[in-house]
Amino acid sequence: MRVDFSLLLPEMLLAGLGFLVLIVDLVLPQERPERRNKAVAAVAVAGMAAVAAMALATAPDRTESVYGGLLFIDAYALLFKTLFLGVGIAVVLMSVEYVGRVIRHPGEFYGLIVFAVLGANLMASAGELLTAYIALELLSFCLFVLVGLTRGDRRSAEASTKYILLGAISSAVLLYGISLLYGTMGTTVFREMGPGLAINFSPTVIVGFAMLLAGIGFKLALVPFHLWAPDVYEGAPTPITALVAVLSKAATFALLLRFLAEVSTGRFDQWQLALAVLAAATMTVGTLTALVQRNIKRLLAYSSIAQVGFVMVGVVAMTEAGANAVLLHLVGYAFTNLAAFAVVVTVEAKTRKEEIADYAGLSTASPLMAMVLTAAMFSLAGLPIFAGFITKFYLFTAAADAGYLWLAALAITNSVISLYYYLRVVREMYISEPEVEPERIRLSPSSAGALWVLLAGTIAVGVYPGPLAAAVDAATDALRAYAGGA
Amino acid sequence: MPPVGYAVDWTAIVLAFGVGVAALGAMLAVAKLLAPRRPSAAKAIPYESGIVPTPLNWTQFNIRYYVFAILFLIFDVEAVFLFPWALIFLETASYVFYAMMLFIAVLLFGVAYAWRKGVLEWR
């Protein structure tokens, strides 16, 4: 079997970049950590930008697959690759100052981010369960280490331990599910599993599929597999919280959506109902628990659980409109959540504070950060002109059109409730009187630049979604179930 | 029809097991009969590479050992992969050779990294 390695060039270069980042950290003088930190971050950002440009430039016109369908190189994978590389760049930019003050291991920090992005890219390409599993583990292992990288911080160590233990259990469940499906169907390639899944309703298949969903549900923090999320979000270094919230969620959705689209050729109603129940539980629990949070990172943790529930609403529809809405929402959510985290990271790097009450007076301390965080909160709540409004609208419409009216109604109710806790942060920043006179916060050029770009993205997706919608449409056309659709 | 060879194969293993137990028992018995016996307190201590053994397995040990444990594990796993590869790489395609070289290079990079970062120094 001939393999056209040129198709995998972006992935190979990205793996090379991970090592390059580590090597740059090694060869630079160890005595000047601040300069080393900036140089390593610059290499990581420039490298990921170059890989993204190359992936876009060399993308094949039609769907290609390598290793007999193990990996797909198509418009769908390309959209996610570009998104993930962008997320990686944004996280590195927002964490330069944080790493200098808190972490002090730039090589490991940025290198592992690059490898995590590589794992996410492979998840978006994977067309076979074991390949998907290996890609998922590459991403997860990087995150396990990154979460525990604040040495000497008890919460960080606790978060990392919990994440590793629960992650290992969920991986075991996932693998057991894969083995059961392989045992009955004799294949792990998505396309070849479709006919078997449609007609075979033996207990083995049902248990196997349920275990597969549970394993993926853990990575997505779907209720009832969400209990790790708040502790990990709170304990992890804040830029890594952003990475867990955006990169690992979006990558797992990329995998889940491709899997469902490739296997659902026949009857799939039973699974649709199961997914709908998971979606309903996830968004309700996430929203209601977020109401009582005091720590901004825990608030964003529960908010991201609720957001995952909203995305699941689009997945449940299992129509092309639903898939389009999921992709659109993931892009908008990436901009919005990264904007929110960029502010939280910068505030923490400057003041070491992470309670919502500490944000009182931020509007005078840093008008730009207050504005960006306000935009992000509005967008997460789903207010018009921001990304969250238009993408949630598409998500709920898709579910309603597919006959899940109750789910759409529940999603809208949750969305309204969520307004309360998102606006509380805004009120804190603009209306509450701070206890001490706020000191003016000066932003570094890289943080300010990242904030402006993320703000622009959050608004652009909401105001002018046309070009993105076209790219999303091309991406979902590459999936078999929606090929040649409207 | 059940496979005929099944029972035959197991006979060999059962035989080998029996011979092993018998041989070991015989050796221990001969040693017990013939060897001189002068017990002392030092001889009764369990052997732990020459270090005086600690009384309980719940005692604290230095966290710095974990780096050595990890480095040892890495090379242990490397050896597990190297042995089967060494048996077949001459007969297989050339990329099998280069794949292992790449694997070793990645591991060597890890050692160089640990070295440069001062992990191998006992401070």
Image: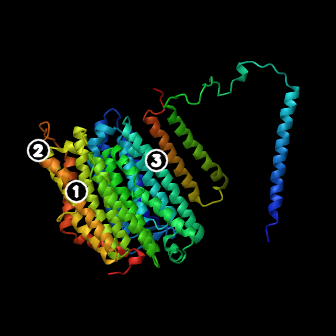
- Where is the N terminus of chain B found, in terms of image quarters? bottom right
Amino acid type assigned to the residue bearing label 1 in the image: Leu
Q: Image point 28% across, 37% down: which residue?
A: A101
Q: How many labels were placed on the picture? A: 3
State whether residue A54 appears in this view.
no
- Where is the C terminus of chain B found, in terms of image quarters? top left
- The answer to which of A420 and A149 lies nearer the viewer is A420
Crowd tier of the residue under label 1, counting other residues whose Cα lies within 10 Å: few below 14, some 14–19, many 20 or above: many
Judged left or right of residue A373, residue B107 is right
First reached walking from the N terminus: tag 1 or tag 2: 2
First reached walking from the N terminus: tag 2 or tag 3: 3
State whether residue B28 appears in this view.
yes
- The answer to which of A356 and B26 lies nearer the viewer is A356
First reached walking from the N terminus: tag 1 or tag 3: 3
Q: Position of residue A129 (x, y in %)?
A: 50, 64
Q: Gap between marks 1 and 2, in whole Å?
A: 21 Å
Name the residue carrying label 1.
A454
Name the residue carrying label 2.
A364
Instruction: Evaluate if marks 1 and 2 touch, with contact meaning CB atoms under 8 Å apart.
Output: no
Name the residue carrying label 3.
A164
